[in-house]
Each structure stands twice: as C-alpha cells, then as structure tokens.
Amino acid sequence: MRRTISTRHLPTICLPVAGLLMLIYHAVGRSAGMPFMLTLDDSYIHLTLARNLAETGVLGLNPGEGGGGSSSAAWTFLLTLFYKFGAKLDVTAWGMSAVFGLLSGWAAGRLARVVLEGWYAWAAGLAMAMSGMMIANALTGMETTAALFFFLVALERSVSGSPVAAALLFAVGSLFRPELALGFLPLAWQAWRQPIDDTMQRKLQGGAIFIGLPLVAAAGVLLLVWVSNGFPSTFAGRQWLAGMPQHPLQEFGLYLAAVGNGLQQYLVRISSFIGPAHGFGLIWGTIVLLLSAWGLWRLWIKGNGYRTIIGLSILPTLFFLLFLPTTGQMGRYHLISWMLLPLTTVLGIREASSFKHSTTVKRVLPWAALFLAAGYIPQAIRWGGWHHDTAHHLATVHLSMAHTVKGHVEPDDPVAAFDIGLLSWQSGCRVIDLGGLTGGDMVEAMYERRVAERLVKRNVPYIILPEMWQGDPQRFQFAERLGLSTADLQPLERRELD
C-alpha cells in the first residue's frame, strides 16, 4: 500500500514560514539605517484619512474637507478606532497588515491541504506561504493582506462544502477590497447548481445569504466612496496613469493599446517577478501558465465547490485588465489571483502525473517540477530586495518632498502633487491631488493637458513633482504628460539622494 504523508500540520508550518520571511525583509530594511517606513505611498493616504476622520469627523484628505474617500472602508475605520485610543497609526497599520500576512500563510496551508494531498499539498502550501509578493505586501500597512486572508479562507470553506460560510467571508472581505464581491458570482452559480431538496423558507434564507451579503457589503463600500467624492475620480486618475483614454469607446485603439500594455505587465510579472526572469523566466512562466490552465480545467471537472477557485482566478484579473490595466505597486492588484498560481500549478503537475499511458510525460514531469521549484525560490530573495528599495525610495524621495514643502510653503497655501500620501501625512499643508482624490476636475485637466491653467484658476500656487536624475533623458517625462512647460519649472530645493 502506498503511504500518503500527513498534511495535518501544514497550516501550522506555513504560518512561521511566512513570519520568518517577514522578519528577514524587515531586518534587511532597518539594517540599512533607514527610518521606519511603510513601503507604499498609498499607505499614508489611509493614515491621513483615519487621522482626519478621528479629529474632525469628516472623511477627507485635508482636515475638515470632504473628499478623498477610501476604497477600503473597514481598514480606514479600524485605523480610526485605534487612533481614538491613542495608537501610533503607522506602526498600527504595519502591525495589522503583518498579522493578516501571517494569517494568510496559515490560510494558504489550509486551502492547499483541502485541494491537494500528501507532498503535493505541502509543495503548494509552502510555495504560497513563501510568496515574496505576499510578504512584501504584508509590510506595506495596506489592506491587501486582510483581503487576501478572507479570500483564502472563503475559498477553503467553499471547497469544503460550506458555501454559506464562504459567502459570509466574502462579504466581510469585500469591505477591505470591493473586488472580493466578485466571490458572489461563482458562489451563486454553485448554489443554483445544487439539488433542491429543502423547504422554501430555507431556500429563501440561503438566497439572502448568497446574494444579499456580498452585494450589501460591496454597495456599502461604493456608497462610501461615492458620497465622499473620492470615486470614481481617483479611479479615473489611476486610469490616466496607466495610459487609458478618457473615452475608451471613442478612442478604442488607444484603449486596446493600454489593455495590451497591461497584459504585457502581467506576463512580465509572472516570468520576472515570480519566476527566475530573463529567458529562463519566459520558459518558466509558459510552463506555469500551461500547467495552471490544466489544473483549473481539472478543478472544473471536479464540481461546483472547486469552480469557485476558477472564477476567482480569472474574474479579478479580467476586471483590472479591462478597466485598470496595471499590476499596481507591489503587484497588489493581482496578488489575490497570483497567490493561487502555486496551487493550480502543483495541481496541474499532479493531474499530468496521472496519465497512465504516457511514459514520456512521466519521464519529463519530475524534471519539470524540479525546474519550476528552482525557478520559484529566488523570488523570495528578489522581493526582499524590492521591499528594501521601495522603503529607500519613500525615505529619500517622498519624505524629502514632504520636508521641502514643510520648509518652504505656508500651511494655508495649497500644494498640488500626484503621490500625495506621505506628503499629506507629514507636511501639514492643504494638498490638491492631481490623481482625483480631492476632486475629479484635476483628472479632466490632466487628460486635457491643462493642469497649470486649472491650478491657477483654483489659486493653487505650487505643484511639486519629484525631479529625476539630471542625466536621465526621461527627467521631465511626467511633467510633459501633465502639459507643464519644463521652462516654467523651478526647483524649491535640491537634496542629495543616497
């Protein structure tokens, strides 16, 4: 009899594996002598919103001003609550995202042992727990790992045959990231396909859970950001940054080019950010995608509970490719679906190994699995380097911008900028976000390349942009995209960057 290795302790092992990588990443960053920093500028937007909400009762980027709605209602309100009790917000946000990162490692182990068995489960679970992308996001102070945790646990409950619990988890998770409401779609399909053998009252109750909770949660998030005028203008600002045209249907060629660029970014991430990069990364990524596709197809055959994984591997990716074709900083827009790559790849390997009449497949498969494992391990080191580099970038560029504004601009004078998180958190000045967080008119001005004219009309005397290295041929590329004349740009202060 063939013995199968136990997976009972897999989740327990995955948690400290993720924790050890977090400690290493954090220690490397601090050993470089940098101050304690969250590694995404957007993290400081949440901190500023929470502080202003706690102090003024108004959700906005500037104290007492509405606007700047949060796309993560639960995260912002949790930070507000902690601030009310005297917590230091940046440390609190970092701790929250790190804790949810640890829990995501644990949840990855649970999901792997439900979908797979034996060594296959161990390989998939440990690979997910070692995801450098997840570890780096866990140290940003953002809500990404909170959404990831609820996503993984909801999938595990769905595969285990508890669709009601899965729906509840997706509902809670959608308060952290609205796209988790997409979990409703495969669950609704799963409920519709189940045999009807219950009373009408139970069916109505089940329908209310399946349909009502995720939609109510998502509607609450959207209502919050719409009322606060932070959405969809900030979404449009992100689209401008990603190269999307203002009117996609009227400029369909530009729209297709932006989507194509987003797809290219997605494939580069798989081959270079998750795989070993360069030519080997291309081969590695191709094998991973083929095996994942085969694994997803086998999940489809298994039945409804497993089809939830298929839906949530595809739907969020399609949403961002079609409406916001960029991977986002730290790849956070696609982290949820990318976390499933090790699982579906290992599943594809297992299913391919079951071919009884193909000796070639059986002979090649162990070498392919070894190649994939060897190509995957370096990503943990590479993401540690990127974690350090992003912290260094914020400490030298964004923090310098905030100090420059604080030293040269009067508190009552508004300042326009694009990356406004750390600037708002540190400078104490009124900030106008070019990306639309403080009003959608600036996004329109960016598309029209009339930013300077719009700022003059709004009596905004300053616009601050990070200056590139003087020898960089793209030194003023961002300013030129905004329609600003480089001859009119004057440096407020020059700082030497390490």
Image (spheres, rainbow, N blue to C red):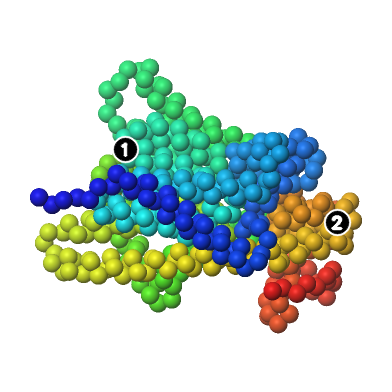
Tell me which numbered mark, 1 or 2, is placed earlier along the sequence: 1
Residue 326 sits above or below residue 207 on the image: below
Quarter assignment of residue 343: bottom left
Residue 480 sits above or below residue 450 on the image: below
Residue at 49% from the left image edge and 42% from the top image edge: 180
Could you tell me if the residues under marks 1 and 2 are in contact, i.e. CB atoms within 8 Å? no
How far from the left and from the top, in percent, is residue 55? 77, 38
Q: Amino acid at mark 2?
A: Val
Give the residue pinned by disc 1.
Answer: 160
How far from the left and from the top, in percent, is residue 294? 28, 57
Residue at 47% from the left image edge and 53% from the top image edge: 19
Q: Nearer the viewer, residue 162 or 440?
A: 162
Marks 1 and 2, how far apart at CA: 57 Å
Q: Nearer the viewer, residue 359 or 141?
A: 141
SS for callout 1: loop
SS for callout 2: loop
> Mark 1 packing: few (<14 Cα in 10 Å), some, or many (20+)?
some
Relative side of 262 to 194, left or right = right
Give the residue pinned by disc 2.
Answer: 460
